[in-house]
Amino acid sequence: MDTKFHIYNTLTRKKEEFIPVNPPNVGMYVCGPTVYGDGHLGHARPAITFDLVFRYLMHLGYKVRYVRNITDVGHLENDADAGEDKIAKKARLEELEPMEVAQHYINSYHRNMHQLNVLDPSIEPQASGHIIEQISMVEDIVKNGFAYESEGSVYFDVEKYNQAHNYGILSGRKLEDMISNTRELDGQSEKRNAADFALWKKASPEHIMRWPSPWSDGFPGWHMECSAMGAKYLGLPFDLHGGGMDLKFPHHESEIAQAVAAKNTEPVKYWMHNNMVTINGQKMGKSLGNFITLDQFFAGDHKALEKAYSPMTIRFFILQAHYRSELDFSNEALQASEKGMKRLLAAIDTLKNLQPAKTGDVDASEIKTKFYDAINDDLNTPVLLAHMYDGVKVINNLRDGNRKIDAENLETLSSLYNTFVFNILGLRNDASEDGNDDKALNRLMEMIIEIRKDARANKDWATSDKIRDSLKEAGIQIKDTKDGAEWSKV
RNA sequence: GGUGUCGUGGCCGAGUGGCUAGGCAGUGGUCUGCAAAACCACGUACAGCGGUUCGAAUCCGCUCGACACCUCCA
């Protein structure tokens, strides 16, 4: 491989070669879910995108510590009210402990992630378990003069910070514009400036999630947890911070400001942001009636869905677009992906059964170079898949005897496809896993195919077709190749 | 209004200053008892209008439109 791994750094707005701060160790932090609702596509995209980053960095030989947090304190419902957060609200409405609400959705998030074949992170810290660290970091910021206390709450002094540093370095915003564009909101009298954000918030009497602090019984501001937990588990500066583009401002911008204000260091070397997901060209929202959870996708249980889509179809579909492009879900597009993925996976099965020739005309190292060039170019999975499909043609031609391959190239090609498809892209061949490994079923199918073969030899097409049609109803497809019949689960 | 990202063939989706990815769908063909699968062949698309250039879909400007964030919802 002669190309180096390059990623697009939001901070510099260009592609940069990835060079870790302390090789061979890599620290990466990704904003995880706020656990107060079922998992949906908006959760799947960043999870899969950064799962790919995680997998590829490990493939390159790095020792990766991947931290993905769980936000179980909840973001403020809005800036104007006294500060009830989303989880507390849900808990109050359902008469549950906030931690019951959080645990319920943590469990369902984990289940969805495993279905999507997303690897577990190395550490999955919860905000509620790191209140002490967050308070300590707020104290540092206060001590350094970039925050002030007001009515039991603590606010980050954005204007003062901006005089010494640059608030807007990540998002490209200018403080003057932000101030001039801010409308008047109620309950902001505690802040000196509308752009200031809460580091610690005093809890109103009805707020059930609260912790003691030097300032008040309350809860941490919504950017604090990532700053505190990233610093604790990865040290500053660490290599990679990821998340959705919607988090760029104000969340990530404020994380940078907090780290600089508290520790006087830029916290992160490379910032990566995945783009958003739309459904039929519209953004997904509960109010728009196109809000589809992952469970609904997997079960086909939503009026907008023509059928169920397997977790692997969703994963493959997400990988078919570049992570920085907007991605639009539609039944048509999903079904196209499903078929395409099946063809790719079928070719890998074919690859297993290929026999090498003494000499051949297939150069596997050429294909290998193309694969690595694509993924090294800011994880260009659509181009990678395009090259994979070129290889699928080669594989099918080998099977049909139109081309020959020698043993060495066959070995290279085979390990290349298995590595990329299963280890790096993280796809799973559901059909062969729960189907072809079943010994009893295999024996049974051998027998049925033998019977059908006899029928065909006798030109008993009625029996032959009956077997084929019945099996199809049972979810098994027969393909008559010139080397005999093959079967697979549909 | 501000900031950012975009507008590519029927659908999805890469990419590049001249050699015109890929998937799905479609058409014709090969194979087959039929079917499926597979293979072969076929589509000169790049929002609009100007400009730069020998040459632009790719660079610049303007116009129109979309999406995200700043404000809800995730």
Image (tube, rainbow, N blue to C red):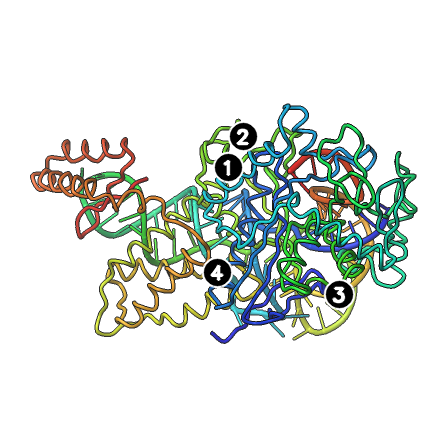
Give the residue number, with chain letter if any, for mark 3: A265
Foreground disc of the pair 3, 2:
3
Q: Label 4, label 3: how many angstroms apart (C-alpha)? A: 37 Å
Q: Please give the name of the residue rendered at 19% of the width and 46% of the height, measured from the top-left corner.
A: A485
Q: Is residue A460 above or below residue A229?
A: above
On whether disc 1 and disc 2 are found on a single subunit, the reply is: yes
Q: Which SS class for mark 1?
A: helix
Choose between A468 and A187: the one closer to the eye: A187
Q: Label 1, label 2: how many angstroms apart (C-alpha)? A: 8 Å
Query: Residue A14 placed where, x, y %?
Result: 68, 65
For the C terminus of chain A, which image quadrant? top left
Label 3 crowd bin: few (<14), some (14–19), many (20+), radius 10 Å: some
Q: Hey, what amino acid is under mark 4?
A: Leu
Q: Which SS class for mark 3?
A: loop
Q: Which SS class for mark 4?
A: helix
Q: Please give the name of the residue rendered at 29% of the width and 59% of the height, measured from the top-left corner.
A: A351
Among numbered discs 4 and 1, the one appearing first in the sequence: 1
Give the residue number, with chain letter if any, for mark 1: A331
Q: Which SS class for mark 2?
A: loop
Give the residue number, with chain letter if any, for mark 4: A384
Q: Hey, what amino acid is under mark 1?
A: Asn
Q: Label 3, label 2: how many angstroms apart (C-alpha)? A: 48 Å
Query: Residue A160 placed where, x, y %?
Result: 90, 57
Q: Is residue A206 above or below residue A190?
A: above
Give the residue number, with chain letter if any, for mark 2: A304
Q: Chain of mark 1?
A: A
What is the quadrant of residue A232 in the picture? bottom right
On whether disc 2 and disc 4 are found on a single subunit, the reply is: yes
Q: Hey, what amino acid is under mark 3?
A: Thr
Query: Residue A10 placed where, x, y %?
Result: 69, 60
Q: Please give the name of the residue rendered at 62% of the width and 58% of the height, measured from the top-left corner.
A: A233
On whether disc 1 and disc 3 are found on a single subunit, the reply is: yes
